Image (spheres, helix red, strand yellow):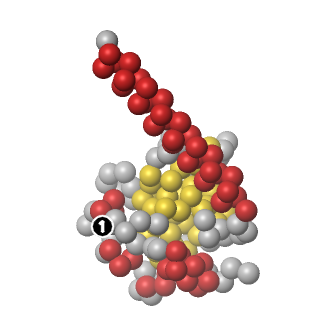
Amino acid sequence: MEDKVESESLARRTDSLMSRLLRWLATDRGNAKRYPLPGLVAYYWTSGTPKACSVGNISSTGMYVFTDERWLPGSVIPMTLQGVSATEQDPEDWIAVLTLVVRSGPDGRGLAFVFSRSTNLFGDEIPPERVADKKALKRFLKHLKLP
């Protein structure tokens, strides 16, 4: 009985920490200028073949993607970003990012970028040097010619 009480208490504290983190991500980061990019595609994979979804808008801190996937807030989703006309020959045409689901919309999900030194979420699919840090993401966005 005592173990059950301790486990429920730990779950409440963990949930509370996660709730606070998600609130912080959704509010504090919402001040970044967002840009619509109709030619930008985000690819994600949970297993097997990557799936594409359109990017509704993007900023230096996150993006909104149009998707039917119903990822739960707090889920970490590895993605690659590239323009629809990208050839993948130019290393500036695509970038790998880790994202955290922070909100749900009627037609997609709001994602915050997570910058981590760990690249193991991409497995063997993405070379470690292609996983974005803040500087690499800013270079990529500049390459896309954001205003």
The reply to whether residue 110 is in sight is no
Please count the marks in the image.
1
Q: Nearer the viewer, residue 111 or 46?
A: 111
Task: Report the quarter where the N terminus lies.
Answer: top left
| Residue type, numbered disc 1 | Glu
Q: Residue furthest top?
A: 1
Residue plotted at (48% across, 34% down): 13
Element under disc 1:
loop
Residue plotted at (33% across, 59% down): 121
In the displayed structure, would residue 76 be above or below residue 85? above
Q: Please rate how many residues cluster around mark 1, counting C-alpha atoms within 10 Å: few if below 14, some from 14 to 19, many from 20.
A: few
The reply to whether residue 112 is in sight is yes
Residue plotted at (31% across, 54% down): 48
* Residue that numbered label 1 is attached to: 125
Residue 135 position, x and y percent, is 52, 80
Q: Nearer the viewer, residue 52 or 146?
A: 146
Residue 31 position, x and y percent, is 73, 62
Residue plotted at (43% across, 30% down): 11
Q: Residue furthest left?
A: 124
In the displayed structure, would residue 75 be above or below residue 81? above
Residue 111 position, x and y percent, is 57, 55
Task: Report the quarter where the C terminus lies.
Answer: bottom right
Residue 54 position, x and y percent, is 59, 60
Q: Nearer the viewer, residue 6 or 24?
A: 6
